[in-house]
Amino acid sequence: MDFMVFQYPMITIQACLDGVLLGVLFALIAYGMALQWGVMNIINIAQGDLVILGGYIAYFMYLFGIHPAWGVIVSPFIMYFVGIGIYKLVINKVVDRDLFISILATFGISILFMQLMNFAFGADVVLANSGYGTTFLFDSNVVLPNSKIFSAIVSIAFAICLVIYMKKSKLGRAIRATAQNARAAKILGVDTEKVYAATFGINAALCGVAGALISITFTIHPYMGLPYTIRSFMIVIVAGLGNLPGVALSGMGLGVFEEFADYLLGTEFRIGSVFLLLVLILVYRRFKLSRKREYLK
Amino acid sequence: MNKNIILYAAILIFGLAAPFIFPAFKVQLSILCVLIILAVTWNIQGGEMGYNSFGNILFYGLGMYLCASVQVGMFFPLAEWTESGGEKTFVHTPTQFFQGMAVGLLVAAVVPTIVAGLIGYSILGLRGHYFAICTLGLGVAAGEISGGIEIIGAGQGFTTPPFPNVGGLEARGEFFYFCSFFALVIAFVTIRAIYSTRFKLILNAIRDNEDKAEAMGIETMKYKIIGWMVSAFFCGLAGGIMGGLVGYIDSTDVAFDGREMGVFMVLMAILGGKGTLWGPIIGATVFHIFKEGFWTFFLGWQYVALGVLIVVIVIYFPEGIMGWLREKYPERFGEVVDEADRKAQVELK
């Protein structure tokens, strides 16, 4: 088992490419997480469920005969308003409270969404067939579905658009100002309530894009949300808030790790290894930080 | 003090008589006892220590698997048992069953305690939301990993040994009720004893300001680990009993069920009022009644209701029942209230 990686280099290449393409998607979700975490100081456990909901929008377009790739355009629009709705109903009441309150409240939203999606869409694992075919590399030893390449390109495009938007537009400036110091921004005339709503909406829209891409490339299922939340959380804590290249790199790293875990340990341990990695990273971080604290002494 | 003794005696007698007064609700009452144990032990971290754990489900599930595995493994090959699934090729005699159960419960309580002690140093060093997410990850990881291990049934589940044919039809329910009730009594007595010592004050100091507590010369890490180990002990015990009661262990739906038990224990403690002795007990009772009502009459919508309930409780009712009572009748809680001050507050509102 252990030697497989070296004996069959093609499998290694395959896993690396798969992982990188997958990791770009994770990075997109993590970017949304970092955005709301940085601006509102909220950890949204329902992040993954927003992703899955976005995926179902694309899937339904596919069922009605529209090419699912258009979901990339439609689902962020719908998800933006879903995000605003969630913000108005729940999040604005927990923004300035204890972080645990927001974790628990969004956990409740997550359970609610999971079950509502289970009712609405059924408990089957579904995917939207894009019909994009596959690319063969290295004498057909490495097989890459075109949909994965498509999804990676689209997510990179969306990420770049968002970065430019955050830099140039008025709302982007307001968001960045609020992230730096909400009180000062308020004094200077920024409507922070609106900024928070918009941030949560943008986060939900990003989840919508990612979900639509996931429904094309992988599969979606009402209960598959939590792993996406955990992955994005992990990427954010590894990269740090507001470190975009770090988010992209650690997203890809996580993707590669997952593919290797899948090959080496077996598919049944894939999700488990992700969660275990989270625990290990947090523990590593804790020891690193405690060493730093000792230096200060 | 005298009043308290009468109250406790009344509760104890009621608890002992309950399965005979309500014979139809024996299973429900046993589940209630388990829920109370979970809520009360969660409260040690979440309420008193300020470490909001989603991961106590880890010890619960561990205890469940350990108890059943020991009970089977003491007498029969474990792998063949799980492979045969529902069809019983091996049958426990009554003596074997009870011996296995006793040893199993002991193991189910002790091993999670050791595990908590071992991982405590690394996990409890995390603060705030990092701790919450890390423990959430631990619980889910345990569920996913145990779902891939062949010897304890992997994905198809683990059937615990059936109750032996002694003492008539009612015996099974009564046995598990008294198991869980005694576990509850032990848990309550232990925790009450702990709460009356300096230990509780230290936990509260950790909750209020950990760095300051450390600066005062308290070895916070030691006390945090001890607190977690106490929780783990009773969570494991509760898990072992629950495994026997349910009769079937599935990795993600029964044992490491973060979506149900893992959330329930947090919710019950918050509903009752965290940081109080009686709060989690009241919360668990109210929650259990609500849950059973909803699970029976609106089957299928229970998770929707659960999600809404979490959001509503967390946003509008974070102090819980005890907190609400305390605000309404502060005299009952031994707080001296200045009448003029109170009037001024009412006028302010």
Image (tube, coloured by chain):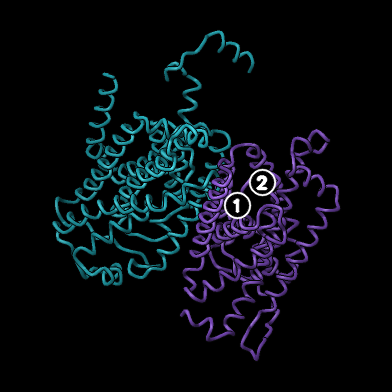
Chain colours: A purple, B cyan
Where does the image place residue B187, in percent across and percent down from the top left?
Answer: 30, 39
Residue B253 or residue B140, whichever sits in front: B140
Where does the image place residue B220, in percent across and percent down from the top left?
Answer: 44, 39
> Comparing marks 1 and 2, which lies closer to the viewer?
1
| Parent chain of label 2 | A
Residue drawn 58% across the image and 51% down it: A45
Where does the image place residue B33, in percent across and percent down from the top left?
Answer: 32, 41
Query: Do badges 1 and 2 share one subunit?
Result: yes
Query: Residue A46 got which mark?
Result: 1
Residue drawn 30% across the image and 72% down it: B83
For label 2, the crowd category at 10 Å Cα-Cα, with few meaning under 14, some 14 to 19 and many 20 or more, is some
Q: Quadrant of residue B294?
A: top left
Q: Give the distance between the C-alpha atoms of the residues marked 1 and 2, in whole angstroms.
A: 10 Å
- Which residue has dot 2 on it? A86
Where does the image place residue A137, in percent across and percent down from the top left?
Answer: 67, 86
Asked whether, in this view, residue A251 is left or right of residue B207, the answer is right
SS state under label 1: loop
SS state under label 2: helix
Residue occupying the far top of the picture: B340
Asked whether, in this view, residue A130 is left or right of residue A276, the answer is right
Q: Is residue B53 visible?
A: yes
Q: How many marks?
A: 2
Asked whether, in this view, residue B286 is left or right of residue B191, the answer is right
